[in-house]
Image (cartoon, rainbow, N blue to C red):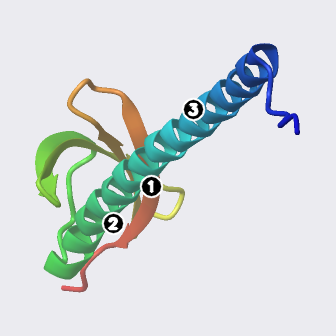
Amino acid sequence: MISRGFTLLECVVALAILALAMTAALRAAGSVATSTDGLKTRTLAEWVAQNRLAELRATGAWPPLGQQDGYAEQAGRRFIWQARVQPTPNPLFRRVDVQVFDQDRRPLVTMTGFLARPLR
């Protein structure tokens, strides 16, 4: 009785196909990990911008026109924020654009809010 098995050529072809499939799977997993980290970073940057606007509203501040810079830490990461205060057509309101950057000064998030002048 003759037992038939795979030839060497068939084994090499099967291994080549398997190697291609594994390479594609690893590349896809790496892409998912990279995009997940980017999403986490942008989410934390959004929280920094929201916190800056909420702080201005909560304190009832009427910030001067111009630009303010600062740092904030969120989940162990340090972010740079820049708030640009601008007038509006209504003198009782001011527009605040908060932009958040990573440590390399790459912009991550821009958020706009409006402040009402505190009553006297």
Residue beneath disc 3: 27
Element type where label 1 sits in the image: strand
Percent position (x, y) of residue 47?
Answer: 32, 64
Whether residue 91 is visible? no
Density class for disc 1 (Cα within 10 Å; few <14, some 14-19, many ≥20) is some
Q: Is residue 107 above or below residue 113?
A: above
Residue 50's label in the rendered image is 2
Q: Amino acid at mark 3?
A: Arg
Q: Earlier in the sequence, mark 1 or mark 3?
A: 3
Q: As rendered, which of 85 and 44 lies closer to the eye?
A: 44
Mark 2 or 3: in front is: 3
**Which residue is farthest front?**
1
Circles 1, 3 touching at the beta carbon (< 8 Å): no
Which quadrant is the C terminus positioned in?
bottom left
Residue beneath disc 1: 111
For the residues labelled 2 and 3, the Cα–Cα distance comes to 35 Å
